[in-house]
Image (cartoon, coloured by chain):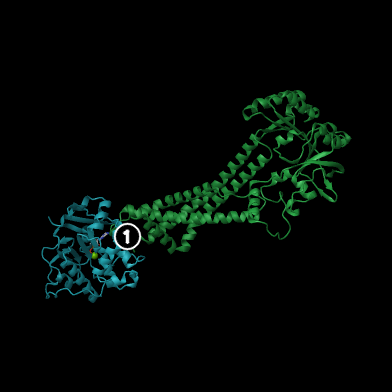
Chain colours: A green, B cyan
């Protein structure tokens, strides 16, 4: 029997009992919608995390972090030196497998002022020029710090575009790019000269949006002008980067730290020591080398550890796997329930149609023809449900997007759609098997006599 | 060789431990082109015989040869094919599909024999013309009178050009006037050379068929009851065109 015909008959059967079919399909609709939406959210999460990770530095970046001393060194806790320039210098001289070492000394509670305008940076840090390669910065305007700036602790700084936007005006507001090189600003009341400015960092999505806006041509702005960076979705890592202020490490030490530690004691601790290894294959030996050197400078007190991006990637992947698993289980349960609904309705439907089935058999329908007819009807219900579910998932994702605009953009993947539809079809087949088998085995005479 | 040969066919039903011999050693030959009526009291086994002849049911014992095929040991699949191509069955209660229109109902057997859509439509229309209903092809069965529905059923039985047509009390559910028209249609088909077996307990119908078989208690009676077979009355005139 003609397949197309059978499908059309199946669709008619669905249409003839619209409400009943809709109720039957509800499980499938919910299952498909939750599966696709869940996958979209997870994909968005994944994209956001990966993008942020890249914005924070590449995969070969390793953070040297403080940690509590292990229990067997508890009595030495007071002697723990923490991360200082001693470590940095030792590593720089002796760790041959570490091409890049970037110490950071953060100044906390910072306000930048320019005239009457003020801004709080995401971070105000004393750094070495190594930070550019370490944190993957692009210096677009001016220069970075020289050895003399470091040596003399010169009051110079390099800023991100976010700082410029707030103190001097954003290109969106003033219509052109302001480059405030040579301007003097105050950092916590101390005068600093801006010597350089980074490029504007943005996510792929923001780039696309901007290109689109440009292609649309100039638009009349209604309402307040939109800010770049913060507030736009997926932008946390980029916002942080755009609101950075760097000064020479020595400047941070001399001008902010040496006079104002706890109990007026200068605080020599670094807030970060980032290192980069020569290659990922050399990660293990490089870390071992660094550990050996630091064991010397720390007098064998293990108050430090290494965090690799690989660890972070692993934990991101683990989170994503977990989210996928729980989402998948929820969707599978709804699809299972949907399948039971379909089987139920198909059984009811063949009971209603026993006489019709008998007539078809009397004029020559084989058991196989009846079997495929019922099976295809079942699959048609499942697939129509899946279609509605896919529609619902787009609605759901749109809704999510509009109520949480700052979260990661959910991305509906083709794979999720294919899996959801294939799974629904499978559910339809499995649910239809038993009713189809029952209908195919009907004896024509008994079926015809059935009232 | 006869078109149909029954040898010692039995059909036994079991109802709560009791054995009902619906057919009890029936032997019968039907030649191609014959027009036969089967008569007998209610419950004598006429329908059972028709169902077995029509490959809708299988016998408990005996052999049946239909158009050269031994059907008592055919598979369900083969039986379906025989029902589809070699047999046309007309029921007392028409048995049309209510959701399909007249044309689609007539097309149904051809769907199972894999005839293409265009040819299906042409042949169905031809069959409807033969029963004089081509102007009702788009109607639903429920929009037709009983006689018209039975003519649709006959068109459906004819459409695959079967070797033999079985009709189980085709007029049993119709008033006598309409019944006569249906009978006239069968007579016309018979004169066109079709092989027809029909069950009736209307003596007037039995009277027009050249051959009559009477069934009593599941057995073929040696001598036909003259009154039941309508032999006590004059033969009706030649068949008129059927209009219902
Ligand atoms: N499915 C069945 N189960 C049990 N007995 C049956 C069944 N079908 C028919 N019979 C019995 O077989 C006998 C013949 O029935 P049937 O062929 O329908 O008679 P007719 O058509 O001549 O009136 C009856 O006694 C009937 O009760
Ligand atoms: Mg009967």
Q: Is residue B181 left or right of residue A117?
A: left
Q: Which residue does the image show at 45% across and 49% down from the upper left? A: A426
Residue A52 position within the rendered picture, expressed as x and y whole percent measured from the top left: 66, 42
Residue A178 position in % (x across, y down): 77, 48
Q: Mark 1 = which residue?
A: B117
Q: Position of residue A41 (x, y in %)?
A: 60, 49
Q: Is residue A132 left or right of residue B190?
A: right
Number of numbered markers: 1
Callout 1: residue from which chain?
Answer: B
Q: Is residue A198 something one can see in this rendering? A: yes
Foreground of the two, B152 or A68: B152
Picture quarter with the N terminus of chain A: bottom left
Residue A315 position (above or below residue B162): above
The quadrant the C terminus of chain A occupies is bottom left
Relative to the observer, which residue lies in front, A402 or A93?
A93
Crowd tier of the residue under label 1, counting other residues whose Cα lies within 10 Å: few below 14, some 14–19, many 20 or above: few
Q: Quadrant of residue A394?
A: bottom right
Q: Which residue lies at the image location 19% right of the left edge and 72% below the top edge?
A: B184
Is A352 placed left or right of B165 in the picture? right
Ligand 2 in which quarter: bottom left
Residue B91 is at least partly visible in this image = no
Residue at x 74% of width, y 49% of height: A177
Q: Residue at x 14, y 75 (%)?
A: B237
Say which quarter of the image contains residue B153: bottom left
* Horizontal and vertical percent position of residue A351: 38, 59
Left/right placement of residue B172 relative to residue A409 reads left
For mark 1, give the secondary structure: helix
């Amino acid at each position: 029997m003609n397949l197309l015909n059978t499908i059309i008959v199946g669709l008619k059967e669905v249409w003839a009992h619209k409400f009943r079919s809709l109720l039957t399909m509800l499980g499938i609709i919910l299952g498909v919608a939750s599966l696709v939406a869940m996958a979209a959210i997870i994909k968005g999460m994944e994209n956001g995390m990966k993008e942020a990770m890249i914005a924070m530095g590449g995969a070969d970046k390793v953070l040297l972090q403080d940690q509590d001393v292990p229990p067997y060194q508890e009595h030495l806790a007071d002697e723990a030196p923490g991360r200082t320039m001693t470590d940095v210098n030792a590593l720089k001289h002796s760790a041959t497998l570490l091409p890049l070492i970037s110490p950071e000394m953060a100044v906390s509670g910072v306000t930048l002022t320019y005239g009457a305008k003020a801004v709080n940076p995401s971070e105000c840090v004393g750094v070495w020029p190594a930070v550019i390669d370490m944190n993957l910065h692009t210096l677009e305007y001016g220069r970075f710090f020289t050895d003399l700036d470091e040596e003399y602790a010169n009051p110079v700084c390099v800023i991100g575009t976010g700082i410029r936007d707030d103190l001097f005006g954003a290109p969106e507001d003033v219509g052109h790019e302001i480059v405030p090189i040579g301007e003097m600003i105050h950092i916590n009341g101390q005068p600093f000269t801006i010597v350089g400015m980074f490029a504007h960092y943005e996510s792929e999505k923001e780039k696309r949006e901007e290109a689109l806006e440009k292609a649309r041509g100039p638009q009349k702005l209604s309402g307040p002008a939109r800010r770049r960076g913060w507030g736009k979705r997926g932008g946390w890592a980029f916002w942080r980067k755009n609101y950075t202020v760097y000064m020479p490490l020595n400047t941070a030490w001399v001008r902010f730290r040496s006079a104002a530690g706890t109990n007026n004691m200068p605080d020599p601790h670094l807030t970060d020591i980032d290192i980069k290894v020569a290659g990922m294959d050399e990660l293990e030996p490089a870390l071992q080398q660094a550990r050996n050197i630091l064991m010397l400078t720390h007098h064998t007190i293990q108050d430090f550890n290494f965090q690799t991006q690989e660890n972070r990637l692993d934990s991101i992947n683990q989170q994503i796997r977990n989210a996928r698993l729980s989402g998948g289980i929820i969707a599978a349960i709804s699809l299972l329930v949907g399948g039971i609904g379909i089987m139920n309705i198909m059984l009811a439907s063949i009971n209603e149609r026993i006489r019709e089935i008998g007539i078809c058999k009397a004029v020559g329908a084989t058991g196989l023809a009846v079997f495929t007819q019922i099976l295809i009807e079942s699959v048609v219900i499942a697939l129509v449900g899946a279609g509605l579910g896919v529609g619902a998932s787009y609605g759901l994702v749109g809704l999510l997007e509009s109520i949480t605009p700052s979260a990661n953009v959910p991305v509906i993947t083709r794979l999720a759609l294919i899996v959801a539809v294939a799974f629904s079809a499978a559910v339809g087949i499995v649910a239809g098997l038993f009713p189809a088998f029952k209908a195919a085995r009907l004896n024509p005479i008994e079926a015809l006599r059935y009232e | 060789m006869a078109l149909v040969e029954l040898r010692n066919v039995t059909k036994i039903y079991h109802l709560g431990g009791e054995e009902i011999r619906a057919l009890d050693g029936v032997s019968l030959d039907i030649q191609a082109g014959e027009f036969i009526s089967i008569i007998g009291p209610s419950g004598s086994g006429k329908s059972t015989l028709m169902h077995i002849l029509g490959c809708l049911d299988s016998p408990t014992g005996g052999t049946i040869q239909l158009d050269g095929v031994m059907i008592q040991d055919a598979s369900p699949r083969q039986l379906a094919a025989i029902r589809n191509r070699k047999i046309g069955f007309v029921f007392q209660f028409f048995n049309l599909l209510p959701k399909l229109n007249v044309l689609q109902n007539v097309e149904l057997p051809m769907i199972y024999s894999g005839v293409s859509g265009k040819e299906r439509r042409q042949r169905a229309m031809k069959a409807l013309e033969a029963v004089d209903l081509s102007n009702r092809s788009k109607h639903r069965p429920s929009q037709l009178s009983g006689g018209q529905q039975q003519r649709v059923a006959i068109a459906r039985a004819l459409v695959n050009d079967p070797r033999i047509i079985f009709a189980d009390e085709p007029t049993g559910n119709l008033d006598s006037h309409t019944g006569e028209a249906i009978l006239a249609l069968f007579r016309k088909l018979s004169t066109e050379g079709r092989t027809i077996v029909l069950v009736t307990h209307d003596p007037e119908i039995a009277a027009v068929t050249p051959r009559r078989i009477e069934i009593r208690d599941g057995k073929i009676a040696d001598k036909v009851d003259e009154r039941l077979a309508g032999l006590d009355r004059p033969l009706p005139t030649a068949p008129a065109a059927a209009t219902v």
